[in-house]
Image: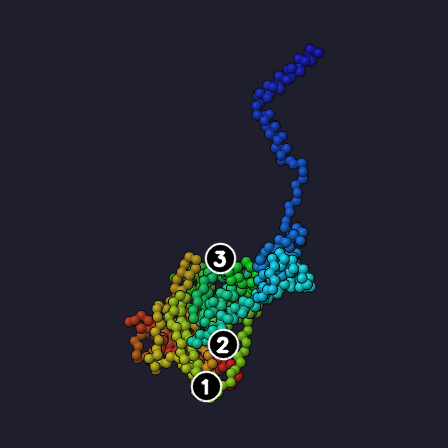
Amino acid sequence: MGGEADRTAVAARNRSRSFAARPGACSETVNAGIKSLYLTPSIKPKPNLCIESLPSEMLIKIFSYLDAVSLLSVGCVNKHFYHLANDNGIWLKIYSICFQPKRTIWKMKSEETETVSLGCAALHDRKPGYWKKEYIFKQIAAVKMRVMRLVKPVDPYTGLPCKNKEAMKASGLSWMIVLKDKNGKEHLTEKAKLSFKDTSVTILWYSTNWPCLDSLSTLKLFGVIPLLPDQSRGPSKNGPRRRSLIAEYHLANVTESSVALGADKLVQLFSLKPGLLVGLWKEKNEIAFVMASLHYHQLLERSTLGSATVQYALPPNKPVLDDVDPEYGLHDYSLHLDMHGGSCTYLCGTFKSLFCRKGDIANGYLRLTVVSLKDNKKHLPLTGTLGLSWETDVFKGNVKDCYVMDVTLLDENGKPFWCFSAPVYIELSSEASSLYDYLGRTYTTDYADSEGKVCVELVWLEETKEYFIVNLVLYISTKKVNNWYGTNY
């Protein structure tokens, strides 16, 4: 017994020595036990919950607190959310708040109104999504009515609506370009700078992430309007919107297939019809910016009434009974001409009582002389240094001897007959000048499309450092005139 007790005492002393030799061993063992106690819970963790797993009744209740734009956005998440976001109870409440009747006999609290609305036959007898469609259609109709009131007043000089800028703001209209590469991938660019003139708007897009020019196949220009414009705030880029195709351009071999307008130290400008300008960096031959010139005539229709794949087609003209006689030719026409280079305006004027005789019809064109070489009293100076301004996030410049020409030709009834806005350039004339009243070089500017041509002759006066327009002639296609009046020239 005594020997066994001694052995027990010796073992106890040895354990105490080992703990004394390693003082941290005990604490490490205890800490490890504590950590294992906390890191190994006895209860299994609950699975992660997501909003999609909530009951439909709860989701509808959550959706009922959203506004119309947010509700439409939620409906794009998945099919389940789409069906729930079509709930007639939610949309009837939104519809009733927005389109309240002008006269009410009984005034009820909001809770009572909601209870009556949700229990009425108009709710249960309708298919899902009915009140959503009714709300959207009525909102679109209200915006159209507001825009129509703004475009109703017409400027007697231009024959165009006076409040185009206000009408575009009311509709929430903006413009975007979509670049498509040869693999079918699309690159969207919306950041733009606008410049409004009497008869046109100039849109400049610039970005630091343009795709490689050699990989691109087409460029599409769209008008974009929000599905539900909100007058209290600017148009949201994240909300539901509609696209309307305005024009499509082919970018394959753009430097060879387009017209070179000019260049400065940094960029080269190339023009694509109708009204598109592409600026390329000189060193890299890559896109620096894209500029579009859009004439106000039919701009709202083209930017809003087309589809995402089909351009808006202008309706045919309905001729007004008149004494039009092919032997007599065109008469009492008016021209509004605007020459500008972005922020600078070089010429803005209106020319009335334009006409042509039968002898002025040749080679499929009718000639309208606006400024004649023989009448030096009507020769016009261009104010300022001629050039087209451009800019990007970092650089800006001005390409000399090119500008944007806006032409608005009105018929004898003051109706827009031929309208366009396009970048053009001037070049030194190859013909010897016969202008003895001027001592200077002669330059020309030409524009042509399927409906007509514009020919401008200018003289550079070195003493005053300005251009003078000494000859300005419009050539209108007889095919266009015949289609317009239903005659045969």
Who is closer to the viewer here, 453 or 229?
229
Mark whose residue sits in front, 2 or 1: 1
Q: Residue furthest top?
A: 2
- Position of 113 relative to 167 (above/below): above
The answer to whether the residues at label 2 and label 1 have Cβ atoms under 8 Å apart is no
Which numbered circle lies on residue 54?
A: none
Residue 200 in sight: yes
Residue lying at 30% horizontally and 77% vertically, measured from the top left: 438
Residue lying at 39% horizontally and 64% vertically, measured from the top left: 398
Say which amino acid is labelled 3: Asn
- Among numbered discs 1 and 3, the one appearing first in the sequence: 3
Residue 479 at x, y percent in the picture: 51, 81
- Among numbered discs 2 and 1, the one appearing first in the sequence: 1
**Quarter holding the N terminus?**
top right
Which numbered circle lies on residue 329?
A: 1
Question: Quick one: SS at disc 2?
Answer: loop
Q: CA distance from mark 1 to mark 3?
A: 53 Å
- Position of 50 relative to 148 (above/below): above
Residue matched to label 3? 209
Who is closer to the viewer here, 304 or 360?
304
Residue lying at 59% horizontally and 64% vertically, measured from the top left: 104
- Position of 362 relative to 96 (above/below): below
Say which amino acid is labelled 2: Ser
